[in-house]
Amino acid sequence: MLRPTGVFVLGAAVLFTASLSSTLINALDNGVGKLPALGYNTWNAYGCNINEDLVLESAQLMVSLGLQAAGYEYVNIDDCYAEKNRSASGDIVADSVRFAQGMKNLTDQIHALGFKTGIYSDSGWFTCGGYPGSFQNELRDATTFQDWGFDYLKFDNCAIPFDDIIREGMIGKYTRMADALAQLSKSSGQPPFLFSLCQWGWEQVWLWGSTLGHSWRVTGDIAPDWDSLAYIINFNSFITQATSFYGHNDMDMLQLGNGGLTFDEAKSHFTAWALMKSPLLIGTNLSAITPDILQILTNTEILSINQDPVVGNSISPFRWGINPDWTSNSTFPAQYYSGPSENGTVFMLLNTLNETSDMFFNLTESPWIRAGRQYSVRDLWAHTDNGTAVRNFTAANVPPHGVVALLLEDAGDEPAGIFPPCAVWFNCAYENGTAAN
Ligand SMILES: *[C@@H]1O[C@H](CO)[C@@H](O)[C@H](O)[C@H]1NC(C)=O
Ligand SMILES: *[C@@H]1O[C@H](CO)[C@@H](O)[C@H](O)[C@H]1NC(C)=O
Ligand SMILES: *[C@@H]1O[C@H](CO)[C@@H](O)[C@H](O)[C@H]1NC(C)=O
Ligand SMILES: *[C@@H]1O[C@H](CO)[C@@H](O)[C@H](O)[C@H]1NC(C)=O
Ligand SMILES: *[C@@H]1O[C@H](CO)[C@@H](O)[C@H](O)[C@H]1NC(C)=O
Ligand SMILES: *[C@@H]1O[C@H](CO)[C@@H](O)[C@H](O)[C@H]1NC(C)=O
Ligand SMILES: *[C@@H]1O[C@H](CO)[C@@H](O)[C@H](O)[C@H]1NC(C)=O
Ligand SMILES: *[C@@H]1O[C@H](CO)[C@@H](O)[C@H](O)[C@H]1NC(C)=O
Ligand SMILES: *[C@@H]1O[C@H](CO)[C@@H](O)[C@H](O)[C@H]1NC(C)=O
Ligand SMILES: *[C@@H]1O[C@H](CO)[C@@H](O)[C@H](O)[C@H]1NC(C)=O
């Protein structure tokens, strides 16, 4: 009964399905980037004002300040490293003044310090700073970056070709480079690049479970102030389930140490980014870093959760707090979060108010907590064991815009005779059918 047009339509549908599934499944299905990337990026501190000495000096400071020892693995160059024009043969050329020894010389020195290193390009005609973008030059540029010795590619979203040229959606647009990186790895036998997508917005929820790239940006650029942090945390709190091993919501680079944040706000920033399993890329002038900020960046109990090798989940809100559950509020995000880890349940309590507050929760508000059990409490900022929680926990005097991070480990059955006999009072019944209340 199929008329020729029917056959044609069916054929097109089959082709479409095949190309979509190859997009989602094959592009970068390479096992690289299971855990969020930890490292340094030049953008927030220096913008376009970069050169080889500064990059190398940052790498050296990452070592001498103990950041490498704490697990930070990448030293990444952002936009503005290139000449405005490609070479006569069409290749991206490193700025001949600011990177006078050439990129390979620089990456060799960064590698010699024990780091991997990242470079930047764009999915459109130009980068956001007006340098050459990689559209229609994906494989060529990937090859250049590999020849230069890079291991990681941040891929931005500026100067996208008009629709009649690109004829791609967000996924197709980034698949062009994902495929180029996969092809390059295959043909060169070298390890695949870590691919960090810089799409801005909520569309990354459609990437759940995909392996298009290591991470995808969830918002526009971060600013070093509480409003920006609150905006990003609120936004990300609704899409935490998009994060898992090999695919991470990227909340943008860390602004700690760039002014505009109190010490408590800086702790909240680091905690939220780490526990939501965002890549953690330090974006400050390391020559001017203070002991306070360094202490935050090297909190290994927090970093360990970010780098959990067994559990890939982000924390998620279990109660919004001052606002009704599921309220999206860019200045007052959810306050109570939890998630699983290899050692127990992680809690983040975020005091979004600008006054000191006590923060209370019942343990079983978190879906990861077992009813009828008690839990030992580890404070991941005080680095202390804070006793055993039965049924509930109160963090007293949480500072304005401050944070509490806790690890609750199962410590056996709760003591007998606790009232009420059912923590979630409306949920229990006796075996004979009588309700508990
Ligand atoms: C770069 O390319 C543009 C367009 O082809 C050309 O007008 C310009 O002179 C070139 N600039 C340099 C520095 O070569
Ligand atoms: C980088 O260039 C400098 C200056 O030309 C040279 O002394 C050094 O040996 C080079 N380093 C590497 C790792 O190639
Ligand atoms: C970085 O910090 C050093 C030391 O305080 C200072 O000399 C330098 O000017 C700073 N660089 C920038 C770009 O702020
Ligand atoms: C779990 O505990 C062990 C032992 O203290 C520690 O080495 C590891 O980093 C912890 N894992 C996480 C995800 O915190
Ligand atoms: C955000 O929440 C605060 C605290 O409840 C409230 O005062 C404010 O009106 C809310 N903002 C919006 C835009 O709903
Ligand atoms: C809290 O923030 C509001 C709005 O910015 C301001 O009016 C108020 O004075 C602040 N309160 C404190 C205790 O800082
Ligand atoms: C917290 O749990 C304890 C039992 O450990 C109970 O006595 C107390 O009433 C609970 N507090 C609140 C506010 O529910
Ligand atoms: C845990 O105990 C330490 C040491 O007494 C204290 O400084 C910290 O505030 C406590 N943490 C919480 C969340 O109560
Ligand atoms: C905590 O548990 C107590 C006792 O079951 C209950 O009365 C209270 O409403 C709960 N609070 C929250 C925030 O769930
Ligand atoms: C069901 O069992 C509970 C607990 O043993 C008891 O208190 C209650 O009276 C019983 N209800 C009936 C209808 O037997």
Image (cartoon, rainbow, N blue to C red):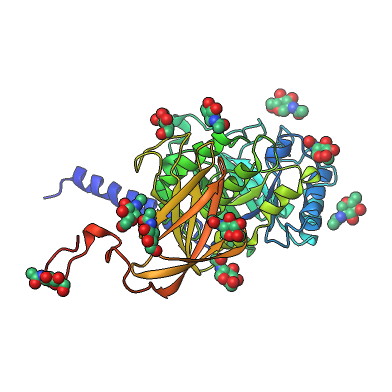
Where residue 86 sits, quadrant-wise, is top right
Q: Which quadrant of the view contains residue 49? A: top right
| Viewer-side residue, 4 vs 402 | 402
Where is residue 261 shown, x and y percent of the image?
A: 64, 38
User: Residue 258 placed where, x, y %?
Assistant: 70, 38
Left or right of 30 on screen, residue 382: right
Q: Is residue 411 visible?
A: yes
Instruction: State the residue in front, 111 or 40.
Output: 40
Q: How many marks?
A: 0
Picture quadrant of residue 113: bottom right
- Residue drawn at 43 percent across, 43 percent down: 334
In percent of width and height, residue 247 lies at 49, 55
Which corner quadrant of the figure contains ligand 5? top left
- Does residue 292 appear left or right of residue 179 in this picture? right
The C terminus sits in image quarter: bottom left
Seen from the viewer's position, the closer of residues 154 and 222 is 222
Residue pictured at 37% horizontal, 73% vertical: 415
Nearer-the-camera pick, 186 or 306 = 306
Q: Position of residue 95 (x, y in %)?
A: 78, 38
Would you say residue 278 is visible in this rendering? no
